[in-house]
Amino acid sequence: MHASFEHRLREAGLRVTGGRLALLHVLERSPHSDAVSLHRTLVAADARTSIQSVHNVLADLTVAGLLRRIEPANSPARYELRIGDNHHHIVCTSCGAVADVDCVVGHAPCLAPSDTAGFTLATAEVTFWGLCAACQSL
């Protein structure tokens, strides 16, 4: 995946840096991670980076369209590499685990409100809530 991440960064007009590559590799292994978890993982792997640097890289990659930022209620922002499709998320109400859920309809927006208030709809973000398998067995 190294060349792929390098290619994606260049295509997005971003410089290929060790920090960006390291963060992308961590997200590949741990989708739906927040900035603090990403920082902790990078530091544990001997990456010399600050939490502010992690936030900056996440912002750059999100603006460039390489990451998707999701914001479940009562949770810090989380990031994932899965972009360009219309999928949703399910969040555990006990432990906060997040998983992807493919959209049944497939196309965006998959839902239409009863009144658009004059807006042209582009997408609908759906978050399902429930107990994950691990929390159900407790």
Image (cartoon, grey):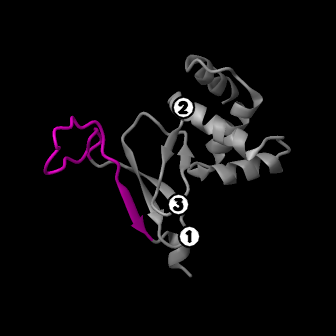
Badge 3 amino acid:
Ser
- Front residue (pair 95, 51): 51
Q: Which residue is mark 2?
A: 66
Instruction: Tell which circle, 3 or 1, labels the residue nearer the N-terminal end.
Output: 3
Q: Which residue is mark 3?
A: 75
Q: Does residue 112 show up magenta in the picture?
A: yes
- Residue under pointer 1: 95
Calculate the distance from the C-alpha at mark 3 to the C-alpha at mark 2.
22 Å
Query: Mark 3, mark 1: which one is toward the viewer?
Result: 3
* Mark pair 3, 1: CA separation: 11 Å
Question: Majority secondary structure of the magenta segment?
Answer: loop
Callout in the foreground (3, 2): 3
Q: Is residue 117 left or right of residue 2?
A: left
Q: Nearer the viewer, residue 21 or 14?
A: 14
Q: Residues within 10 Å of mark 2 (few under 14, many from 20)?
A: many
Instruction: State left or right for residue 111 relative to residue 126.
Output: left
On-image quarter of the C terminus? bottom right
Is 35 above or below relative to 1?
below
At which x and y percent is residue 93?
47, 70
Please give the name of the residue rendered at 54% of the width and 31% of the height, measured from the top-left corner.
66
Q: Position of residue 107 (x, y in %)?
A: 28, 38
Does the magenta segment cover residue 114? yes
Closer to us: 89 or 50: 50
Q: Which residue is more in the foreground, 16 or 77?
A: 77
- Tell me which segment is drawn in magenta: 105-130
Residue sitting at 46 percent across and 57 percent down?
72
